[in-house]
Image (spheres, rainbow, N blue to C red):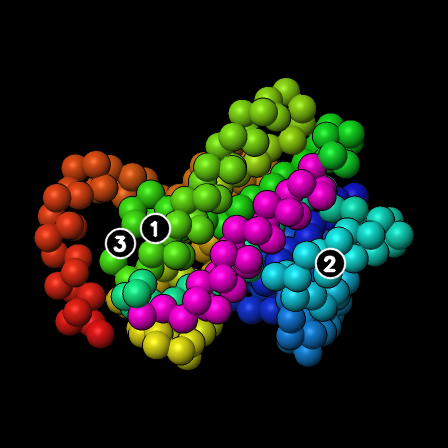
Amino acid sequence: MNQRIALITGASSGIGAATAVLLAKKGIHVILTARRVDRLQELQNEIQNFSGNATVYQIDLTNEQERIKLYEWLQQQNLVPDILINNAGLAWYGFFHEMPWKIARDIIDLNITAPAHLMRLFLPSMIQKHYGRIINIGSIAGKLPEQGIAIYASSKSYLDSITTSTHRELRNTGVCVSILRAGPVKTEFFDTARALENGGSIPAERLAISPNRVANKIWSLIIIPRRVAYVPSYLIISALLETLFSWAIDLLGPLLLRKRK
């Protein structure tokens, strides 16, 4: 692992920061990307204090030209990643018809377009080296689209689909694309959702787990690559809920959302 390089999006806090620290402790050189460069530099200092290797790159991932510049810069610096963690994401909670379109577009750009573009940019070099790990941070919402998260759940369904397709395409190449279907995680994610225009508190927040548990699962996917993993592991049953109880969700979902709002 001392020769591996990992690019982590949304590394300024939460899952991204926890994953960066864990991978750096394993000897991997981590590329920290996010908008908040001050937070990235603090994390870089933390990693360097235990003799880890970290490089900071400030980026707005919703901007296509900035993604291309990141790719070109990493090539120039001889830091093309072997591991890509598509972690950056955004959510909003409330009725879809009340959702400002700018926020919907931002979620689509960050949760869908950015990870797909980064995969397309870095997959060729991974295939050439016969080694690569791409881990897309998904959600149980991708298979269980509940009320109040129409665009977010759709974006995670997209990550599920592109992960499955590319995972099957890349058999016997040494490259594995994985989806990590996570439950709610204690991060700034929920605060951001509340702060957005017309947004509300996401009910699942009270069930949230620590980012370190997600980071440990990411590490397990790097060591033992497979198409899908859940965190917590018991959430594997969530894939059955839509199939078995969609009728109940159809009835209760709108009532729960109205009560929450």
Q: Residue 162 bears which disc, if any?
A: none
In which quadrant will I find the N terminus? top right
Say which residue label 3 marks: 146
Question: Would you identify the image quadrant in which residue 43 lies?
Answer: bottom right
Q: Are marks 3 and 1 in contact (CB under 8 Å)?
A: yes
Tell me which residue sits at (37%, 46%) in the image.
142
The secondary element bearing badge 2 is classed as helix
Identify the amino acid type marked 1. Ala
Q: Residue 141 bears which disc, if any?
A: 1
Position of residue 189 relative to residue 159, above or below, is: below
Mark 2: give few (<14), some (14-19) or many (20+) Cα within 10 Å: few
Mark 1: give few (<14), some (14-19) or many (20+) Cα within 10 Å: many
Q: How many marks?
A: 3
Is residue 21 visible in this depiction of the protein?
no
Between 251 and 18, the one lying in front of the other is 251
Q: Are marks 1 and 2 in contact (CB under 8 Å)?
A: no
| Residue 240 in the figure: left or right of residue 20 | left
Say which residue label 2 marks: 65
Mark toward the start of the polypeptide (1 vs 2):
2
Foreground mark, 1 or 2, reads 2
Q: Is residue 45 magenta?
A: no
Is residue 118 visible in this depiction of the protein?
yes
Mark toward the start of the polypeptide (2 vs 3):
2
Mark toward the start of the polypeptide (3 vs 1):
1
Question: Would you identify the image quadrant in which residue 194 lies?
Answer: bottom left
Identify the amino acid type marked 2. Gln
Task: Give the spatial CA distance, label 2 vs label 3.
Answer: 34 Å
Position of residue 172 relative to residue 66, above or below, is: above
Tell me which residue sits at (30%, 50%) in the image.
145
Position of residue 13 relative to residue 223, above or below, is: below
The secondary element bearing badge 1 is classed as helix
